[in-house]
Every structure is written in C-alpha cells, then in structure tokens.
Image (tube, rainbow, N blue to C red):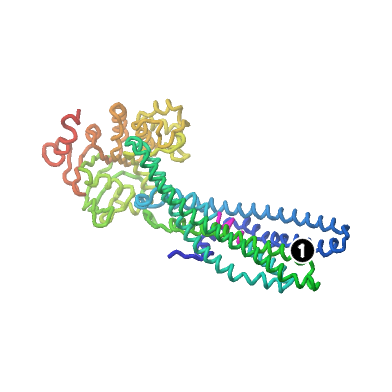
Amino acid sequence: MADTSLIDIPLLRRVAPFAWAHRKPLGIALLLLPLTAGMQLVPPWLIKQAIDGPIAARNPDGLGVIALLMLGALVVQYSLQFVQSYAMHLGGQGIVHDLRCAVHGHLLTLHDRYFRKNPAGRLLTRCTNDVEGIGEMFASGFLTLFADLILLAGICIALVVLNWKLALVTFAVMPALFLVSRWFQQALRGAYQEIRARVSVLNAYLQERISGIQIIQLFAQEDKALADFRDHSEELMTTHLRSIKLDAALFAFVDMMSYLVTALLLWWAAGPIVEDALTLGALVAFVDYVRRFFQPIRDLSQKFATMQAGLASAERVFGLLDETQRIPADAEPTALAEVAGRITFDAVHFEYIAGEPVLRGLSLDVAPGEKVALLGVTGAGKSTALRLINRTYDVDRGSVSLDGVDVRRLAPAALRRAIGVVLQQVMLFMGSVRSNLTLGDRTVTDEELWVALDRVGGRAIVERLGGLDADLSEGGRNLSAGERQLLAFARVLVYDPRVLVLDEATSNIDTFSEERIQSAVARAMEGRTAIVVAHRLSTIQQVDRIVVLKGGRVAEQGSHAELMEAGGLYRKLYENYYSGPAAA
C-alpha cells in the first residue's frame, strides 16, 4: 500500500538537494511568510478600533486616520505577497528545470532494455507532467501550507487575546476538522496516484498511435483507434471526477463548519455584549478573524490536491531516477592510443530473455581493414552480434574485444567514437542538416561535412534542400527513405571511425539510390574494418569474407565462390534470396 501521509519526509528529502540549489528565492519567500501573515492580522484590529472608538463615540474625526492606516496596511500586505509569490514560483520553476534536466540526463544513460519495456509516452509524462507536479507541490503546496500554518498561529493568538472563552468555542471544532481532513487527504492521495498512472497510459497510447498513423489509416482503423482512445480518456475522466468530488466535499464541509462556528459565536457572545464584558468592535474583529481562520483551512482541499499530485509525481520521477538498468562503465577505462580495428568475438553467449539464448558460443575474428558480411536466417543472431560491439548490450559470457581489449574496459564514448553504426531504421531529428550530421559537435567544420556528403553522393540532396542550414522535418519526412539513409551514412563518415558496422543499412534504398551509393559505400569501407548485415547481393559482393550464422554460432565462412562450391547453408540462402525473380 502506498504511503498516505500528507508530508512524505523521504520524498521531500529527495527533493531537498534540488531546492537547495535555489535557496535564495525560496529563502526570501520563507522570510516574508511571517511578515505577510502578520499584515493580514492588522485590518480586523483596525476595524475594532474604528467601531469601539470613533463610531461608538459618534465622532468621525478619527476615522480618517484609521482609513489611512488600513490603506497602508493593505498596500504593504499585497506588496509583500507579490514579492513572496514571485520568489516562491521562481524557486519552484528552478526546481522544475533542474529536475527535468536530471530526468532527461538519466534517461540518456539507461539501457536499451529499459526503453523496450517502457513506452515513450510514459517516459514523456515523467519529464513533463510529473516534474511540473513536483515544482507545483513545492511552490504552491508545501510553502503555501507553511504560510497558512503561520497565519493560523497568528489568528489563534489574536482570538485568545480578544476573548479566550470565545476562542475555546472556535477551537472546539478543530478535532473534527482534523479527522475529516485527514480522511480526505488519504483519499485524495490515492486518487491522484491513479490519475498520474492513467495520464501515463493515455500519453503512451497517444504517442504510439501518432507514430503509427500511416498504418492506422492504411488499414482503415481510425474508428477503432478513436474508440480505444475514448475508453482511455473516459477512465482518466472518471478518476478526475472522483478527486473533484472529494475536493468539493472537503470544501463544503469546512465552509459549513465556519458558518456553524460563526453562529455559535453570535449566540455565545449575546450575553457578554449585553453585560458590557465584550465590545461590539471586539465581536466584529473576532468574527473577521474566524473568517480568516477558516479560509486557509477551507483552501486545504486545494493544498491537499497539489501536495498529493506532487507526491504521486515525485514517487514516479524518483523511481525513474533510481532505475539502474544502464551499461556499466569501467572506473579506470583502458585507453587505446590508436585504433587499428580488429574485432574479436570469443565464445560469446547472450540472451535477451532468460532461458532463451540468441548467441551460443559465437567465436569470430575480424582483422583490421577486413570486410565481413554476416548472413543467416531470421533469429540467427546477426544484429545481436553487432549490438555487442558498441555495447548497446553486454555479453552474458565470453567477450567482445577491440584490438585485443575487452570493450567493457573501454570508455563508452571512446568506443562508440571508434565504431560507426548505420542502422536499417534511420533516425533524423527536427532541425538543420548540419545539426543532424554533427549531432551538436561544434568542432566539425562545414568542409568536413561536405566531404562526407560527397563520399556518399549526398551533396545534391543537401543543395536541393537549401544547404547545411536547411530544416528537416520530424524524422526527416521531407526526404525519401533512400535520401535519409544517405544522410545517415554521411553522419557516420563525419567522424571517420576505424570500424564501420552496417545493419541492413541499404535495405530501404531504392534501386536508383543503390546505384548511386554502392560505390560510395565501397569507398567508405576502404581502410576500415567493416562488418555488414545485408541481404543485397551488391553489398555482399563487396566484402572479403562471408560468415553464415546458425543458432547463434558460426556455421560456415569463406568467399562467395568457396561457399557456393561447398553447397551448404550459404548456397541455400543464396538460391532462396538471389536466384529467380527475386534476383532480377
């Protein structure tokens, strides 16, 4: 069961370091809290002086001074409240910014396994809605609750000073208020936890459907998608309505109690007023203080909502920050003075799911500058082997080494700088061509970018778009699939890696594009170690050695002629893929 306390100390302790970084504005807000609370106590006292003084004496001369004092008190009060509110939200937004950066930075370090299990929409909710909820909890929840407590303490003192007997009447309802508010707080906590969960589900569903909009439209599933979305939205709406009912019920209960106390006060005060033991001004001030006393209590429903939403968000955000699924980095990584490019798989075992091995003792040595093609049926382990080279995943047993050094002992950034990867599914980001080719590396010159583009035959594409500063749409949708792949090749060549890994990188290229880039790919592989997973005959013909995988092991290897003469698995694959109509 989730913790249902109003102020979850462990969670607030987690937020504390982020708050400490913005201690100046938050400190100003805290220092102004007693001043603003004190200024709110002045108007009722001035009203008492006016009623019991000039008004009772039927002498209006003194009312002008009291009116000026009232105006001055209000000006000071609202000026302090403005500064306090601004400082409070300045600190709150600073916390939001730091948390948002921390969450995104942590996401960038997590393992591919984590992203396979968690939808992008859910993670987007963590970085946006949940982080905003924490900032709101701190600025508009926790600090304003503290301000209300100071105001309540000041009002209690004022009530006792005015008339301690009437104060006891007011305080008599406090146990009932506390118990009922506590129950509502617990119910609201559960409601807001469920709201956050359903928001994540809705965002994940929406993100997935937007990404796959073409499939939905091609299969005429718009009505079904809308119906499913409506179901998710109705579930979220139902949960919201439950929290609104709780919020409204608490507000109504506190409002009822305030009027009940006011009625009791008027009934109780009738006798003392008749006996001249209580002045009319004191009673008016007392009722005004009681009204102010119940206002922050009545607003506690909103504070509860903010606090509970923030605590629910904090649980989810810090749950993500506590996630440890990441590729471990060696504390003292080995440095390679110069990368030659030898890749060695030594008895490698690997499985994505426990008990379902993909690689079963894969051993393979690729010499510096050698070009090797990996072939095999689906599930043979081709792409998995490539993922182990740059540590997208780590081996379960055995080792993968670069120039004789286990890749796990190398700094991930240095390893991935030495290994260029081009995938089948190209990812281009919204922004300029330059930003997509450099990925933010300002040391790369325009000349180097044009050289890389020339090597893959991409200059004409970029010039047609308008140059390196031309904008690409989301996912590079203003380019064809082949053009996107050409830019992906250029992006890798910008960094001149010693090892080139191609995972079916030419599968999305049309025949015309293939004719343009095959020679460029051949030039790109010159002087580099290249490991290629490909089914196109034109790509396979450019390699030095063909390695056929079966069941996560090397089944056979050699040149095209040698493997065809052997008449084994490669010959069968070749005849299936490259003979007959498919090869035409």
Q: Which residue is mark 1?
A: 45
Which three-letter amino acid code belongs to the residue tagged 1?
Answer: Trp
Nearest the camera: 312 or 257? Answer: 257
As for residue 143 lying within the magenta part, the answer is yes
Nearest the camera: 453 or 8? Answer: 8
Quadrant assignment for the C terminus: top left
Image location (x, y in percent) of residue 307: 54, 59
Image location (x, y in percent) of residue 391: 33, 50
Quadrant assignment for the N terminus: bottom left
Q: Is residue 252 left or right of residue 117?
A: right
Local secondary structure at mark 1: helix
Residue drawn where x is 75% and y is 66% of the image: 283
Question: Which image quarter: residue 162?
Answer: bottom right
Is any part of residue 143 visible from this angle?
A: no
- Figure check: 460 above or below 25: above
Nearest the camera: 542 or 260? Answer: 260
What's the magenta bit mostly, secondary-structure-wise?
A: helix
Category of crowding for the residue at label 1, using alpha-carbon neighbours closer than 10 angstroms: few (below 14), some (14–19), many (at least 20): many
Q: Is residue 512 left or right of residue 36?
A: left
Image location (x, y in percent) of residue 521: 30, 33
Is any part of residue 476 visible from this angle?
A: yes
Magenta-highlighted residues: 136-145
Q: Is residue 117 left or right of residue 250?
A: left
Nearest the camera: 180 or 126? Answer: 180
Question: Which image quarter: residue 260?
Answer: bottom right
Image location (x, y in percent) of residue 298: 61, 60
- Figure check: 302 above or below 481: below
